[in-house]
Image (cartoon, rainbow, N blue to C red):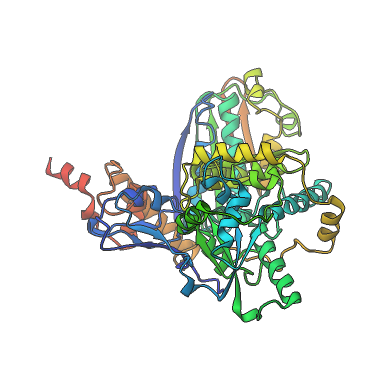
Amino acid sequence: MDQGHTSLHYVQIDEKRCTGCVLCMKACPTKAIRVPDLKVARIVGNCIDCGECIRVCPQGAIKAITTGSDPSTLSRYTIISASPVLYAQFGEQVMPNEVLLALRRSFKYVYDQAYIHELYNVAVGLEIRENRDKEGAVRPMISPICPVVNRLIGYRFPSLLKNIVPIVTPREIAARELKRRLYCESVFDTSEFGVYHITPCSAKMVSIKDPLFLRSSYLDGAIGINEVFELIKRNLRDLQEDMMIHRSSGVGIGWGVSGGEIAGMEEGNYLAVSGLQETIRYLEKIEMGLFEDIEYFEFRACLEGCIGGPLTVADRYQAKRTVAKFVRMFGQEKRLKYAQAQKAYQEGWFHSERRKAPADTKDQNLSLSEAIERQEKIEAVFRSLPGKECGLCGSPDCRTFAEDVVDGLVGLDHCVALNLKRRG
Amino acid sequence: MAHLTKNYPIKARDYLRAGEVSMQVQGLMKNIGFAPEMIRRVSICAYEAEMNVVMHGGDGQMTVEINTDEIILEVKDGGPGIEDISLALQEGYSTASEEAREMGFGAGMGLPNIQKNSDSLEIVSEKGKGTEVKIGFRA
């Protein structure tokens, strides 16, 4: 992928359904949405695919673009690697293995990705241990798991890109190993099979098109949990197969909930933060040099973790309860052999192939002197505004409106509050 | 020459809003598009200076002056002043109150951290009258 990819995003607004209200614009954490003349919402800036707009739209006019579950868009032989969040979508009575078996009825091969999470925990633990005594080591380290957080850092906190641990995510490791194995066994013609990730989140497509630590993704696509939910429910009804696909302990399953990732690691000074607003606050503070005593941050853009993802079906708090039950049931004891995982780590099994350069955050190509002048003008316009934060101008807040005015995107006469004030 | 000045008031002992001013300074610099490393250095210093006012000072203010070749943070407060500036610049030396320490502040790294992350540091302080800190960064 080239570096000038600010328009690469997988959230789409249906212009026919959009009523031109300002809810999505107000909810957008990167201020990437405008509603010109209150007609139709448009994505104009750095969309990080967090899905906040999808959640707040009362018309259901905003959708995440995924590969979808339509067989015609998938490879002939589909291999499914599901996020453990999927296991928590069908209530406490449906076991992970049943979910996997139900999937297997519709897809060629199904893999329990939660197992890889255990391996990943070992790898990150070793990485942290190596970092612990290193002179001038980067602190705190940041989890690379959440693709929204990665993009947020790329756009708004590029100085923290170096803090993201360069370990390949479990979904990618799973896909890579599945492909390797199938290639060795030459079960199918390689051009005919594809590995698809079942995901709770709208941002996975981006991480597949433009992964942070890989030259290219091993995954061939992403399917939303909401897109296979009905299918699985149907298949669950008369499930007769008896076969064990599920092999992970509670450690991997626990990942669906905020704090689950660090719960699987050995003792250390870690912190789990979830929710976009909280994540932004913490990243701001980390950039100010705070939290250097924390070794590792688990950030999740969605509140309560991935179970709160915009493509999930079950209520996040009920899903949280289900995850807790599975964690108790399958135990906190990892099922992998530590020495084996350690050996894989030393052989570079988990390590990145590249480290992405920071995204260019500057929208305009201004010289520093021009940028300061622009900022001066913005401050002047901002001071002249009544500051009602209504959004009727079509910009998300008064400060952004001031920027848009200075950049010539909208006229000052679009400020309704200012017009009312002038009229007296 | 392009030039921008902004003033931010800082309230003493307002731990709830502490850090707000430095976040705004950070946001301002990002908006202009300074290099990440520069933003990091300035925000660390702004934060430490702000916290010094919150912890020790009477009310005060931070002035940010942005020029093409340098950035200056000027922080003034009407607090108790610094008795021995060279002592205050030593790592770990702290006169923070019990209240501040309980909240995790006052580790005695404030001024040393500013010195480490800036290009110039001037401190003028008179006991009982307050403190003026001027921090410079070359762009």
- The location of residue B83, given as percent across then percent down, is 68, 23
Where on the picture, by quarter, is residue A422?
top left
- The location of residue A275, given as percent across then percent down, is 51, 43
Image quarter of the N terminus of chain A: bottom right
Total numbered labels: 0
Q: Is residue A39 left or right of residue B14?
A: left
- The location of residue A156, given as percent across then percent down, is 52, 54
Query: Which residue is found at the position 62% from the left and 81% from the top?
Result: A191
Image quarter of the C terminus of chain A: top left
In the picture shown, does residue A337 fall above or below A348? above
In the picture shown, does residue A350 fall above or below B45? below
Query: Which residue is found at the position 47% from the left and 45% from the top?
Result: A314
In the picture shown, does residue A209 fall above or below A19? below
Between A140 and A206, the residue placed more toward the observer is: A206
Q: Is residue A103 left or right of residue A69?
A: right
Q: Which residue occupies the extreme left position in the image? A: A423
- The location of residue A172, given as percent across then percent down, is 65, 63
